Image: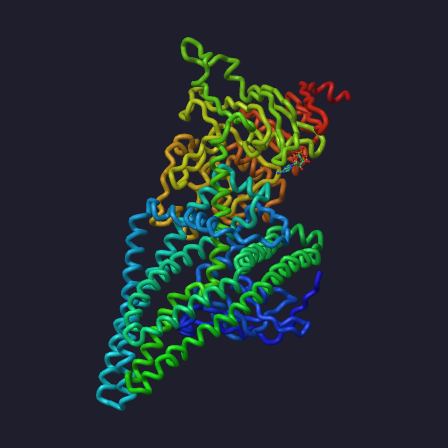
Amino acid sequence: MEKMIIQVQQTYSVSLCSSSAYNSANRRRCCLIGVRVSDGVERGATMSYANWLLFPRFPSLSTVSTTCRSSSNWMMRRRESSNDVESSSSSSRSSGRCAAASGSAPPPPVPPDTEKQREVPELQTLLRRFWKVAAPYWSSSDKVQARIQLAVVFALTLATTGISVGFSFLGRDFYNALANKNQEQFTKQLLYYLGAFAVGIPIFVLRYYARQTLSLRWRAWMTKHYMDRYLSNQAFYKIQSQSIIDNPDQRIVDDLSSFTETALSFSLTILNAVVDLISFSNILFSIYPPLFAVLFVYSIGGTAISIYLGKDLVSLNFMQEKKEADFRYGLVRVRENAESIAFYSGEANEMQLLLQRFTSAFKNMSKLLICSRNLEVFTSGYSYLIHILPAAVVAPMYFSGKIEMGVIDQSTSAFSHILGDFSLIVYRMETISAFAAVIDRLGEFDDLLDSSNSERHSDPSEGISLIHSNVKSLPELESNGSIPIEKQQKLVDIEHLTVETPSGTALVRNLSLVINKNEHLLVTGPSGSGKTSLLRAMAGLFSTGKGKIIFHVNYREDNQPSISSDVVDLEVDTVSDKYGELRRPSNRNYKGIFFLPQRPYMVLGTLRQQLLYPIWAEDAISTADGTKPTGSLPFLTQEPNSKHMSEKPSKPTTEDLIQVLEDVRLGYILSRFSSLDTSYEWSSALSLGEQQRLAFARLLLSKPRLVLLDESTSALDEANEVHIYQQIEKAGITYISVGHRQTLYDFHKKNLRISTAEPSSAEPNWSIESINRETLYNL
Ligand SMILES: Nc1ncnc2c1ncn2[C@@H]1O[C@H](COP(=O)(O)OP(=O)(O)OP(=O)(O)O)[C@@H](O)[C@H]1O
C-alpha cells in the first residue's frame, strides 16, 4: 500500500467563502482547501466539512491551505490560530455530530470495503428512487402546512425574479446617466437604486429563510419516517447482523439532510430558471435577436462537454460518502471500545486500521478532485467568457450609435441570466452528481426498509413461524369456560423446528419439544453449535429455517385471557399506512416473554431508566431540567399506541425499584451513585457482573411468564448465581437458559443437548433428558 505522509505547510488558513463571495454567473458556493503531499506534488482536494474537521485531530496529518473547491452547499469560516469553527449548514453540522449521536448503542459492523468502483445508476432508477424518497412527505399528515409553505417559497421566488428584472432596468438607466455625465439623472437613479435595494433585499432574505425552514420541516418528517421503519420489524438488527448496507446512521443523518435541502433548492432553481428565461428573453430579444443564437449554441455545447467531463462524479461521490462514514465510524468504535483497546494496548493497530480507512477516503477524494479539476477548468472558462461575449456581439451597434452604453450592461446581465438558466447542468454538475449519490444511497436504504417491513407479509409457509397463542383460541376450554390444567401448564410448543443461519447453514435440525410451566430447561452444547441461535429463533431474530414455535404465555397470572388478539403472529405485528407511518410492533415483553442477552445492554440515562427499560423506558425519560420531553416535534404528533397501553403492566413505584435492587444484591449502588435519577455511563461505571444483575432486576420488575437467558450469569460468582436463580424461581418465572457451567444444572429440570450439525447428515442433532441431580453429582 502506498504510504502517504502529509506535511504541514501552513496552519489552517482555510478561508471560506460566504454567500457574498459568489460569482453571480457561477452561482455556487465553494470552499478551497488543498493538501500538499510529501512527494512534492501539489494536489488540491475536495473535502467535506466533516473530513476537514477530522484533519487537525489526526496526529500525523494536517491540512494545508492551497486551493480547492467543493460542490457541497455549505459555508464555513475558520479563524486563524483558533479552534473556532462555524458552520452554517445543517448537513455539515450533522456530519460532525454523527459520531456523537451514535451514543453507546451496540455498534453495527462496517461491511467489508470491496474498493470496487460503484456503477453509476441508470437515470430511470435514479428518477424512480428520487420520487419514492421525495413523494411521501407531500401526502403525509403534515401535507397542508408543507404545501402552504411550498407555495409561499414559490411566490417569494417569483418575487425575487421580478426584482432582478427591475434591477436590470435600474442598472441600465444608472449607467446611461453615468456615461452621459448627467449628474441630476445620476443622483435620481442612485436614489431609485437604493430604494429598490431596501425593498428587494428583505425579499431575497425571506425567500432563503422560508426555503430553509421548509427544508428543515421536511427533514424532520423524513427522519422520523426512516427511523420508524429502521426500528421496525428488527430491520436494524438484520442490517447489522447481515451487513446488508453500509452506514445506515449516516444515511439517516447526513443524506436526509442534504436530500431535503438540495431537492428544494433544485426545484426552486428550475422554477427560477423558467421565469428568468421568460423575463430576460424579452429584454435580450429586444436588444439584438442574433445574441439568442449565440447563447443557444454556447449553452448546448457547454452542457454536452460538462456531462462528458463529470460522468464519473456520481460514483466517486457515492464512494466518498461511504468512505468518510467508514472512517468516522472507525473513530466511534475506538471511543466505544476504549477500555478493551487500552487493555490490549492496541493503539498501534487501531491507528493502522484508521489510517487505512482514511487513506481509502483520501485516494477516492484525490480521484474526485481530478475529475472536479477537469470540470472546473472548463466551467471557469465557460462562465468568464460570458462577461465579454455579449458585449463583443453588440459592440458594433454601440459604435454605430444604435444603442447606448447602458444597453451593453443590460445585455450582459440578461445574457448571463439566460445562459445561467440554459446551463444549469454546466454550473451544477458537481452538485447534481453529489445529489445523485445521495438519491442512490437513500433509495437503496428505502428499498431495503420496505422489503424488510414487507417480509412479514410474504409466504407464511417459508421460514420459521412464530405464533403467540391466546387461551381464548383454544378449542379445549372446559364447559365453564375455564382453561384445562394441562393447557395452563404448557408454555412453549416447538414443532419440527430447523434453525439455519441467514446464509442457510443448518444449526439445529427437526427439534420438537414442549416446555411446561416451571419446567426450566438448560440448553447445552459445544461452542458454535447453535444454542444462541435457537434463542434468536424464539425471539424472532432468526427466521431462516422451518417449523413452528408456539407460545402459550399470553394470559395473565389470574388465568384471565389478556386483552390482546386471539392469535397474534409476530410476523404481522406492525401496521403501516400507505406511506409507512408505522405503529410500533407489539413488544415481545408485553406478551409475557423476556430475553436476556449475553452482553447486558445499558441505555443512556439514569439508574431509573436502566431499571424501567425496555417496558416503561419512554415513561422514565426526562430532560436535564426535569421536565418530560414530548418525544416528538410540535408538528409531528406521535399517535399514542392504545394497544401498547393496554398491554403494558403497571409501572413500578420508586419503592419497587429500590426493593428490586436489594433483591439482586445491588442495593449498595444507590448510595454510591446518590440516587435513582443520577445519569452515568453505566456500561463503564458498573462491572459486568453488576450489569448482569441489573438486567435481572429488569426481569424481576417485568414479571414475565417465560424468560430466555443466554449465558446471562456468566460474569457472576457462584453465590450470586444461586441467589439470582432463586429469585426468578420465587417470582414464578419459567426460564430457558443457555450455558456451559456445571453449576447451572442445579437450577434446571431438563437438559437439551445440541451437537454441532454435520453438513452431510439430515438427522436431528439434539437430545433431551431430565436432570437427575444425584446422578449428576455421582458422575
Ligand atoms: N448472522 C449470522 N450469519 C452467519 N452465521 C452466523 C450468524 N450468527 C451466528 N452464526 C453462526 O452460527 C453458529 C452458531 O452460533 P451461536 O451463536 O448460536 O453459537 P453458540 O452455540 O451459542 O456458541 P457459544 O457457546 O460460543 O456462544 C456459529 O458458527 C456462528 O458463526
The part of the image, by quadrant, that contains residue 318 is: bottom right
Indicate left or right for 308 with 409 as reference.
right
Indicate left or right for 347 with 443 as reference.
right
Q: Nearer the viewer, residue 327 or 385?
A: 385
**Would residue 72 be seen by someone viewing this image from the given angle?**
no
Q: Where is residue 238 in the image (x, y as percent from the top left)?
A: 55, 40
> Where 664 falls versus 425 (above or below)?
above
Indicate left or right for 692 with 479 as reference.
right
**Would residue 310 be seen by someone viewing this image from the given angle?**
yes
Q: Position of residue 96 (x, y in %)?
A: 51, 59
Q: Residue at x 60, y 54 (%)?
A: 117
Q: Which of 328 and 38 is in front in this view?
A: 38
Q: Nearer the viewer, residue 94 or 138?
A: 138
Q: Where is residue 740 in the image (x, y as percent from the top left)?
A: 70, 31
Q: Residue at x 27, y 82 (%)?
A: 174
Q: Residue at x 46, y 42 (%)?
A: 229
Total labels drawn: 0
Q: Position of residue 256 (x, y in %)?
A: 45, 53
